Structure formats: structure tokens, C-alpha cells
Amino acid sequence: MQPFLQRAISIFSRYNPNPDFHYNSDSWAGQNEAILNAKTRIEADLLISAKWIIPVQPEGVVLEDHCLAISGNKIIGIYSQIEADAIVDASEELQLPTHVLIPGLINTHGHSAMALMRGIADDVPLEQWLEQSIWPLEAQHVSEGFVLAGANLAIAEMVRSGTTCFADMYFYPDQVAKAALNANIRVQLASPVLDFPTVWAQDADEYISKATKLHDDYRHSELIHTAFGPHAPYTVSDAPLQKLSILAEEMDLPIHMHVHETAKEVSDALAADGRRPIERLRQLGLLSPRLVCVHATSLSDEDIDSLAEAGCHIVHCPESNLKLASGFCEVSKLNKAGINIALGTDGCASNNDLDMFSEMRTAALLAKAVAEDASALPAHQALEMATINGAKALGLENVIGSLEAGKYADITAINLDALNSTPLYNPVSHLVYSTQASQVSHVWCAGQLLLNDGSFTKLDSEAIKSDSAKWQAILADAEQ
Amino acid sequence: MQPFLQRAISIFSRYNPNPDFHYNSDSWAGQNEAILNAKTRIEADLLISAKWIIPVQPEGVVLEDHCLAISGNKIIGIYSQIEADAIVDASEELQLPTHVLIPGLINTHGHSAMALMRGIADDVPLEQWLEQSIWPLEAQHVSEGFVLAGANLAIAEMVRSGTTCFADMYFYPDQVAKAALNANIRVQLASPVLDFPTVWAQDADEYISKATKLHDDYRHSELIHTAFGPHAPYTVSDAPLQKLSILAEEMDLPIHMHVHETAKEVSDALAADGRRPIERLRQLGLLSPRLVCVHATSLSDEDIDSLAEAGCHIVHCPESNLKLASGFCEVSKLNKAGINIALGTDGCASNNDLDMFSEMRTAALLAKAVAEDASALPAHQALEMATINGAKALGLENVIGSLEAGKYADITAINLDALNSTPLYNPVSHLVYSTQASQVSHVWCAGQLLLNDGSFTKLDSEAIKSDSAKWQAILADAEQ
């Protein structure tokens, strides 16, 4: 048998949704015939033929020369070209002959409005960065208008780079919802909770009541999801944390929280009451499959055991951790402990972009060095972190995160006809180690086309850049 | 005074090439008048007006709304728009209203032909990677044709991403020279030296004689430079190293060598003869300003002192070090010791691209985490590593590495009119932390335009991709 056919069959059989049927050279002809004789034809709004499809689930599968069918806002199936020709009637067909289809990327942690602060304060230590630049700017300028303009900019950058769902923690989450609905992108809004007053609320009770109102406002939305966003163990005291734990259970919502961002956070907590932050959260009843811990550097073995036993999720933000010298997240160790690890860019002010391709690459590269093992975090795992693992952390794994019939048609196409993608032995390797976000050609969210061959279908990028320039002038003046 | 004018004057005065003259609001008008009345006019072949020019030398300067003039293969000056209008007569003018001009990037370490192995073996430990994938493939396939095709691919990728000079260590360096001359890009060929036979030579003497012949062949070339490329301390014995040291001195050539790539290299050397590799090189007389040490992980304080005292250069390859879990290069410490540190991508098989923007970002991010200091390796230093520091390591700092009158017109333009470059407080920050290589719009090498608004002027990228596909088929078959 030809090596190509061998590979094709091996790929095909791994993906076969019917475990009783195995494609092989004998049954191949029969199967085609069965399909050709099928009575029920499938109606689709769009049939995309792609050189490669990487569904992410089942794990490790790469389909060559396959088609994905969409009806309404959902994926209805993935077929070989022969199957599709035989049974699918599509209103529209799209040929992507040098492209790979993957699930829309999920950026599981960020502060979208901070896109307006991209590059305003670099190369300074975390405390100075927060206290001398970011917080004073936020105190002066954060408003509905700021958050809307920043979210518009961030969403445009995310769509352009293949992200179809993001988790956001910032003031005025209602404005982020507005921007997301306008762009038709999916978001989980972690409504902030703090002990101290800001422009958004006066005390923990007001933050929490705004969070529950936000949830009520969007409870029937297809695209807008909500969560509680207590900022960090060191900025939220015991009483509101316990309240959030109860409410999250009652309302069936995730809790999204910065946890163990730095070694100093841990040593300060130990000095304050003798407990590590994760131990305190455990005692408060916060550790559960609802808890999404962002950053998770400086973990002890006991911390890892606690998180694993409770089924907590972690969001790894490698570029932000590096840039702020926050410490290393031991991805390989956490992986071995069975903890679900998603990927996030964090806000633009500490990254300085929202590019999940760059973030996958940094995650995959860094994990190897940290584990002192070049086989740590292989490419396909990095892609899982940026897709299905994000969906799990957000509690959305039944509807997004992989290309499977019945899930929302949240899909990203990447054109691998590029010098930096040549030659091509393995598309998964290229996606993680050599793809530039500018190679993203098409993006669909809930079946709607948002990016068409590199051009926005809904967003006006000139207007967004011009709005951002206005805020730039205001913030630059403030920095003088 | 308006803040903008204040900033403009502060920027301007830092760049003033005449230390006796300072631009300020009083002298400004007089200076313009002096220029306007100047009798000698300047003839240029091309005048490029750019939104920003970052000459790299002097350090830290960002010029706004300035022009760069080229005559023949050299830069003849940088002028304010008013000065240029008054005194420059240019045959051709180019407006780059949203772009930044920087010196052409210098990729100070790589193996260009290995571009054909991009992604063929990922996520495996270094020894397995070398012994089970890379070396068997090289033993079977490396030939003149392989090296020429690989160099063509690598050079096209480098030009597309703003690199105008690269250091290359591989078999058949004459083929790389051919590819570089065809593309009009600058290269320093480190002609390989090993103790054992390969397709390129049978023993150290033959490698060395081929290296000196290569030097003779290209001694009068403007674009092709040569160096000795002993592979590593563990693959070249004392006698050839001493011979190289003498020849390098006589022929005035650099020695380009992998040194301390991993901790294992150091412990193996200690086990073998009780000396660390750098101590052995010191005793052999190799440490000097001619020696370019690639990787330099696992350095002791004594190693650093030895390298600093001798004036050796280091080439940091952060993405390759991470991907192969080779260890961390302590850039901040080396910087403090006054050692010149350049930047390289290494070969595509361990990176997997030749993108110096991504490499600058990884270097700047990683150095902070390794030094546990968010102020380590600020953006402007990362840019220096990718330009003037590379020129210093290659011994070419008098002719390339910065945008200065008298140097070759090796220039890269980047278009910052992009969502991921919005807003813009500091173009240097964006170049390092948020630019995608696809934003490179124009590239000149020795005054010749190689990339015009994203399109090659000399290279045929379709032919290069098709050649690469042929080699892909051959290598993929071998991997079965």
C-alpha cells in the first residue's frame, strides 16, 4: 500500500465516529457505496472544504481534504470530500485549499479595555507598573466610553487573530457585552469584586450585586456568559469570598480569580496569617470545579494537590508572567496532576498583544525549559489549551472548544501557504511553532462569518483605530 | 511650550550629530534659516520620508517625521522634513507615513538550509532530536542541491521578515553564498570544522582548507563575509582549535562556535578532563574579541569573567534554547558584565521560524523572568541585540547595524498602522512586544530594494515554495 494511503487510512480510522466501523482498504469501497446510496441527504448553509481539519476532539486527529458543514449557528458534521459530494446539499460552498480549520481560539483571561494602554508602561517591575502607571491611569480615565472603545479595539484584534471567545475581567462589563454583541463574538464576563471602592462600585456588596444584575441581564444570551471575578486573594476578604462561593453554587456560575500571580503574593499572605493563598481559599470553600485560577505561579506540591483534588482550572498566561517577571507556572507538573490548564494573553498592558498564536508558542517553548524536558507540552497540547481546555474552564465544553457536530460553529481558518509554513510535515507543529496571526484568513462565530479572507465583515477597523487614537491622546497627556 | 514641541525638541537634541549645537525654541528658526541658505545641495538616489526613524545609534533615539537619504549602496544622511526639503535633491522619493525605519535586522546565528526540516521533529529531547531525526536526515540528504534550496527558502523568509544580514553555519557554504548573492542579502558564512567526516569534508584539515578557500573566493565580495565555524568544544579537538586560533588572527576572521549549549555539555567536559569548555578554550588561546559564542547557557561566574575579560561575543538564541530545553542564558548578568550579546534564531528545525521580531520579543520577555526583574532587557536593548550588537559580533559594526551616514543602506520598514500596533505610545515597545513580522513592508540591502510593500523584487516565492515541496516529499519519505 502507498504510504500516503496508509497515513490517510490511519488518520481516518482514528476519527471514525462509529467505533464499530473501521476504514481499511477492503471496506473503503463498500463504505463509499453505502454513503452514495444513502437516502437521507443533509442540508447545510455552508460547506467548507479545507486542506486540513483539526477538530481537537478526538485528540491528536488531523484530517486531510475534508469538509465541515454548518447549518444556522451549529456545526452539523465533518465529512471526507467523497462523503460530502454524496450526501451534503449546501447553499454555499467555500474552498480553502491551503488552509487548516481549527476550533475558534479561546483566550481564557484578559482585560480587554486595557488594549488602550498597549505599550504605555514597559520594562518596569510589577508594583511600579501597577502603582505608578496602570492604577493612576485607571483611576483617572476608566469610564463607560473608555471600556467600550478598549473592548472594541481588543475584540477587533482578537477576531483578526482567530479568537472567537474570551474571558474578560474589568470594570463596566456591560460595555464589553455591548462590544461583543456588536461584533458577534462570545465572551465570559467575570464581573469584578474588590474590597475597596472604584469607579465601578463602592464596596464588595455593590460589586456582587452588580455581578448578579449582569447575569440577569444576559441570562438568555447565546454569546454573553457571566462569572464572578473576585480580583485576587489579597484584594478580597473572607466574607465576600464566602458569599461568592455560595452564590456561584446557587447560580451555577464560575469564579474567575487571579491566584498566586507572584511569589510575593504568597510570602505576604504567609506573613499576614500563616496561610498560603490557596490554603486560605480551600478553608473558605472556594476550591471547586467552578474556580478558575489565573496565573498559578509559585505553587507548592500541597497547593497542586489541593487544586487537583478539587477539580479547579488554571489559566496560564506565559507572556504576561514573563514580562512582569511574575515567576514560572509549572505547566508540565500541573498537567501530570491532571489539572485542566487553559491559556490566556492577560491584558494588553502586560503582554502587549492579544495574539493566541504567539501565546501558544510561548507556552509550548517555556514549558520545556521550565520542566527541563524538550518533550514537555507538545504542540497538540498547546492547541488544546487554547481551545477545548479554555472551554472547560469557562464551563462551555459542551458547546464550544472543538469542531464536532452539535457544537457552535466557532471556527478559525489559517492559510498555511506561506514561506514560514514551508515545508509542511505537520500542520499542528506549524500552528504552534511558526504561524503568524496574520495568516488567519477566516473566522466564524456561532455560524456568522466575522473575517473573510483577512477582511472584517462587521467591524470597521478604521473607526476603531481612530477612536483608539483619541484615547491615546488623552492617556499620553496624563502620562506627562 | 506645547508638550509635543517639548518632546520633539528633546528627541531632536538627543540626535543632533553636532554636540555644540542644541535644538531649542530660540535657535530652531535660525537653524532652519542656516539650512535654507546652505549653498551645497545633497544629491540622493532615494529619499525615504518615514513617520519614525530609529537609528539605534545613537542609543535610545526615536526621530519623528524625518527622512533618510540613500546614494548608491550607502546611507548619506538623516534629516528633518524641513532640512530635507531645503537641501536634498532626490531622484526618487518614498513616503512611509505610518511606518518606522530601523536598521536591517541581523540574525547572528542559524543554519539556513535546515529550513527544509521545519517542523519535521518537534517535542523530543535534544539527543533524540539530533540522533534519531536530524543527523540521519542530514547524513542521507545533505547535498549542494539541498543546501541551495534550503538557503533560498530561509533567505526569502528572512527578507520577508526584515532581516538583511545573517550568520550561517552549515555544509556547502558556497551554496549559501550563491543564494545570498542571488537575493542580494548579506551573510557571514561560518565554514564548518569538525573532527569527523561528513559529506562536506573528511577531517579537520580538509574542513579548514575548505574554509580558507571559501574566504579566498569571497574576499572581495561586498555581501559575502566568512568566518571559521568549529562546531562545538565537544566535536573539535585541541589541535584544530589551536590552528584555527592562529589562522583567525592571521586572516583577521571571526570564530563562530556553539559554546555551552546545555548543562550536559559542561558536565560531560568536566567528567572528561576536569575542565569546563570555556576554561579549555581559554587555555587553548581561543578566547578573544574574535570568538563568537553561540548559546552560552550554564555559565559560572568564572566563565562570565573569562568571556568578559577576553572581549568575546555571545549570540543568544532564546527560542531554540527553550524548545530544546537547553537551559537559560543569563542575559541580564552578561549585560552587566559588559559582554556584547547578539541575537539569533538558530536553525528552523529547532525554532521553527527565522522571525527576528518573535526572537526579540522572546528575548526581552525571557530575560525578565530569568533575572526575576521586570526591568531587565528593555525593548530598546532587544532591538540593539538584533542590530548593532549583531554587527559587532560579526566584526561589521563599521558598515552595518545602525542607520548612520556612511553605513550601507541595509534598512527595514515596518508599517505600524495595524490593530496590534494601536494605540502607539512608543514605537520601540511595539517593535519588540507586539509587531508581527508580516508588518515588514520594505527591505533594502546595500541600497537595493528587496521587498516593496510586502512583495519581493528579486525572489520568486512560488518557485521557492515549489522547490521546498520537492525536498519535503523526499524527507518525509525518509522519515517513514
Image (cartoon, coloured by chain):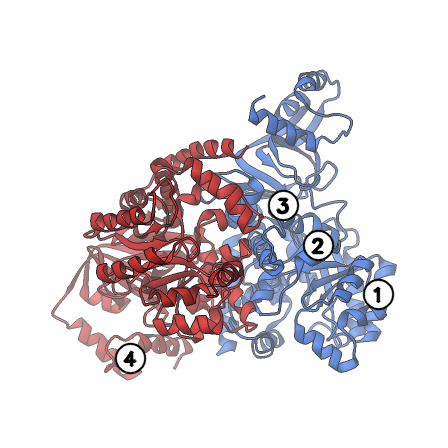
Chain colours: A red, B blue
Residue at label 1? B245
Q: Are marks 4 and 3 in contact (CB under 8 Å)?
A: no
Residue A158 marker:
none
Q: Residues within 10 Å of mark 2 (few under 14, many from 20)?
A: some
Which quarter of the figure is the C terminus of chain A placed in? top right
> What amino acid is at disc 1?
Ser
Q: Nearer the viewer, mark 3 or mark 1?
A: 3
Number of numbered callouts drawn: 4
**N-term mark: 3 or 1:** 1
Picture coordinates of residue A236, whole percent (x, y): 39, 54
Residue at label 3? B380
Closer-to-camera residue (A34/B42): B42
Residue B335 marker:
2
Chain ID, mark 2 = B
> Are the residues under marks 2 and 3 on the same chain?
yes
| Point 71% across, 79% down: residue | B268
Query: What separation in Å lies between label 3 and label 1 (alpha carbons)?
Result: 34 Å
Local SS, label 2: helix
**N-term mark: 1 or 2:** 1
Chain ID, mark 3 = B
Query: What separation in Å lies between label 2 and label 3 (alpha carbons)?
Result: 14 Å
**Residue A25 shows in the view:** yes
